[in-house]
Image (spheres, rainbow, N blue to C red):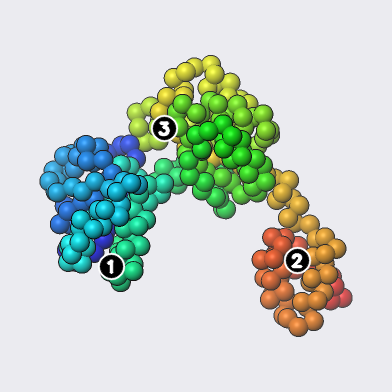
Amino acid sequence: MKAGLYIVATPIGNLDDVSIRSQKTLNDVDFIICENPKHSLKLLTKLGIKKKLYTLHDHNEEKIIVILGEKIFNKSIALISDAGSPLISDPGYKLVQHYISNNLPITSIPGPSSLINALQVSGIPIDKFKYLGFVPKSKNKIENFINDLKNENQTSVFFVSSHKVTYFLEELVGKIGGRQISVCKELTKINENIFRGSGKSLLNKFKLSKKNSLGEFVITLEGNKKLNENSKKITPNVESQIKKLMKKNSLTDVVEIVHNLTNVSKKAIYKKALDLKK
């Protein structure tokens, strides 16, 4: 196998989800960088793979780069996380940057991702979405997090810990009502469960049974529809911009420029521009 960094996605729960390419890569590389060797060994043992493991976490990334030294330049190295696609709310960014700065090859071996899985089964529009990482731990930061969600017109997807999920839903219901939400529990595992509906209906389910709040969770929240509706409107200021730009630009360029500046839909801008040309 050629020297370089191989970023390998691993199962998020069900070990049978490992791809043939991921298995072959892990088997062929010189060694593996992982978050938690004890966790990674479960997968590697199932696959019959024995490799030297280096532990990489948020607090030792620069140290590991130094320890690896020349190996980075002449060895094939796999990077895996405890579950799913590496670097998504997991360590590895500095390592990747080190490879890039030294003009060394990097390859991504795609595979399971709890974010994509959660979006797919949410029943919420996902033509546009924003990933927000983990819900903060402190109450003040959770409040700020939810306040930001109020003004988000795209679908949002994020992680929340088991001991915060019920509290988070309580705060969400109190500050944001009427928007659809999906809470995915233990994706691909035996206890997988997907709760869909309004925040209030889901909160009642979590309060009804403490078992519902046990596990790992990915939340998908519908965007603010009112903001989406407003984004389709042509205000006097937007109309003025269209008029000015039409003097020196093609219709296609005007639509693209105004859309990028205002987030008004291209269809609405096009229609207004045609009306102004009459």
Element under disc 2: helix
Compared to residue 198, the image places residue 256 above or below, namely below
Q: CA distance from mark 3 to mark 1?
A: 34 Å
Q: Which residue shows up at 31% across the image and 58% down it?
A: 95
Q: Which residue is mark 3?
A: 216
Q: Quadrant of residue 29?
A: bottom left
Counting residues from the N terminus, which is met first, the one under dot 3 or under dot 1? Answer: 1
Instruction: State the residue position of label 2.
Output: 269
Determine the residue positioned at 56% across, 31% down: 139
Q: 198 and 130: which one is in front?
A: 130
Left or right, residue 263 beside residue 115: right
* Location of residue 46 in the rendering, given as x and y in whole percent from the top left corner: 18, 39
Q: Position of residue 204 (x, y in %)?
A: 58, 21
- Find the distance from the CA under tag 3 to the CA under tag 2: 43 Å
Residue at image point 26% right, 53% down? 63
| Of the pair 187 and 33, the residue shown nearer to us | 33
The dot on residue 105 is 1
Decide: few, some or many residues near mark 2? Use Cα within 10 Å; few <14, some 14-19, many ≥20.
many
Furthest toward the top, the residue is 208
